[in-house]
Image (cartoon, rainbow, N blue to C red):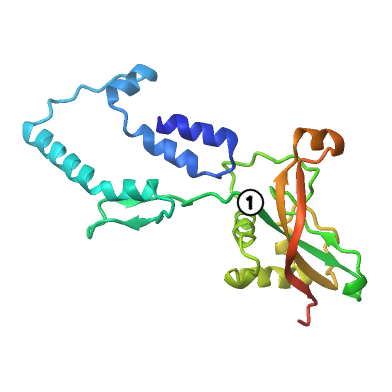
Amino acid sequence: MTIGFHLWLIATGNFSWLNVITVVQAVATFTDRVIAAILPVAAPTAAPTPTYLQAASVAVAAVVLVLSVHPVRNMLSERQRMNAGWDPLHLVNSYGAFGSITRDRYEVVVEGTTDPAPTEADWQAYEFPGKPTDTSARPPQIAPYHHRLGWQLWFAAMRPTPRRSPWFHRLIEQLLAGDDATRTLLANDPFDGNAPEYVRAVRYRYRFTTPEERAETGDWWARERVGSYVRPVAAGD
């Protein structure tokens, strides 16, 4: 069940390598006999399990079962605690990358301009691999590859300001400097390596277009601006 569930997630989502390593761990729960029935390998001949070891296994399973009551209640709760221990020895825990998935998708679009007057500027967007900046671009399948910066941008966009993402200011600073290493993280640099005069960041709410909207516009995404994430800043700022 676990392997099937994660294969479905691999086919339908972009959770980088998280699902793949879970499948690898799940394979270890199969006995040698089951593996031999599936793969062209011979099942090793094993000695009978000693009675005391069988009894110990049952005892450990019973302890884990009792201790797992709290993690299961947590999993079914609307206010989950993720990556938390539930006993003094941390024998059982709640593991996971997310306690819940947000219903709204927010994106931070980083834009730059070479115009010295930002209030009247023609802003051009930087594009990052895998991010839906261009509403006409089809969502790509990138898993199990992991775009770390895109992952961080997704988390940063969940909040209306970069207060809890101090690295974002460093990103803007490097874009204003035309840093070559930072440019390698981009899918498209609208300034071809030249440093812009100003950079800003705008926060949008994205949603998938309906079949009717897609047929009419060709867009995969529809978006609405919900606020300014970082005001226009120059290198001197």
Could you say where residue 225 lies in the image, as x and y percent from the top left?
Answer: 77, 59
User: Residue 141 sits in which quadrant?
Assistant: top right
Residue under label 1, please give it: 104
The answer to whether residue 192 shows anywhere in this view is no
| Amino acid type at image mark 1 | Asp
Q: Is residue 223 left or right of residue 151?
A: right
* Residue ranking furthest to the left: 52
* Residue ranking furthest to the bottom: 236
Image position of 176 with respect to 79: above or below: below
Question: Residue at 52% of width from left, 44% of height from top?
Answer: 17
Return the residue nearer the eye: 75 or 169: 75
**Quarter in which the C terminus is drawn:** bottom right
Question: Residue at 23% of width from left, 49% of height from top?
Answer: 67
User: Residue 170 sits in which quadrant?
Assistant: bottom right
Q: Is residue 126 left or right of residue 88?
A: right
Question: Residue at 12% of width from left, 29% of height from top?
Answer: 49
- Badge 1 marks a residue whose secondary structure is loop
**Quarter in which the N terminus is drawn:** top left
Return the residue nearer the eye: 198 or 231: 231
User: Residue 116 sits in which quadrant?
Assistant: bottom right
